[in-house]
Amino acid sequence: MSAAYTAISDAQSTFDNAASAYSSALNHYYDSLSPDNSSLKKKVTEAKAVMDAAQDTYDDLTAKKTIYETAKDSVVTYQDELQSAIKTLKLDNLGLQKMQRQISQAAEKVNELSGGAGGSIYSQVDGVVKSIGVTAGNTTDPSAPMATIEVPDRGYSVSLTVTKEQAKKVSVGDSAEISMGWWGSSGLSATLATIRVDPQAPAQNKILVFEVKGDVESGT
């Protein structure tokens, strides 16, 4: 850039010198009254030729300077656009990597939940499986039990739904009698352990849970 300005400055100086020489020669020409002025005319012609050449050089360098500045501005613009594109590409790559991780995690979760071939389900307690509520290959209901496991060490309980008014007549710790219908007494005793809200009808009902003691067999 500095070289271009130097060239333009030199051309301007040459043009100024030529213009001054031409003007001086022209003045001498008009001031001369001698009929033999061919030498002076020659000097005027030469000075004008130098001035014209200098003007052409100056105009050419000025045009080149304009082209250079325009090209420089274009380069800066393209560099900015390139940096912006690189930044956008990096962000897109980060987004794709994040999506890939999420897909991989989801696939791992699916494999974990599906159990794969030969998958096993383990109970959190030791006991005896009394019934199985699902079959292989079918879709399970998250709210439905997959199996019923009897845990003798934890005892047995029985629950029943009553109205709120009925629940007010009993308290935790109350004893209850368990009968076998037509067969009379079952020989079992029960104690009211908890009173909780019925999730199916929380505004109307309560659920009474009794702990059962005695010789109990699952399913009776």
Image (cartoon, helix red, strand yellow):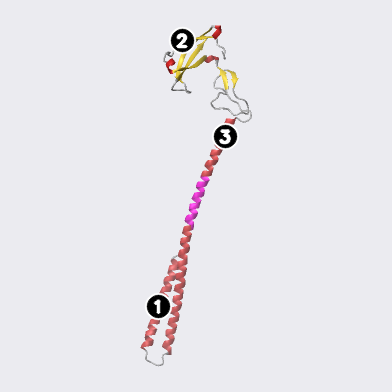
Q: Tell me how far mark 1 sits from mark 2, CA to CA.
A: 127 Å
- Residue tagged by mark 1? 17
Please, is residue 57 above or below residue 103 in the view? below
Determine whether label 1 and label 2 are within 8 Å by CB: no
Q: Is residue 39 left or right of residue 148?
A: left
154 part of magenta stretch? no
Residue 104 in which image quadrant: top right
Characterize the magenta stretch by its predominant secondary structure: helix
Q: Is residue 15 left or right of residue 133?
A: left
Q: Which residues are magenta?
A: 78-94
Q: Residue flagged by tag 2: what amino acid is it?
A: Ser
Please, is residue 2 above or below residue 37 in the view? above
Tell me which residue sits at (48%, 56%) in the image: 79
Residue sitting nearer the eye, 131 or 38: 131
92 part of magenta stretch? yes
Please, is residue 123 above or below residue 217 in the view? below
- In the picture, the disc for residue 108 is 3
Residue 70: x, y in percent? 46, 64
Residue 134: x, y in percent? 60, 24
Q: Secondary structure at mark 3?
A: helix
Q: Residue flagged by tag 3: what amino acid is it?
A: Glu
Earlier in the chain: of badge 3 and badge 1, it is 1
Q: Tell me how far mark 3 sits from mark 1, CA to CA.
A: 86 Å
Viewport quadrant of the N terminus: bottom left
Viewport quadrant of the C terminus: top right
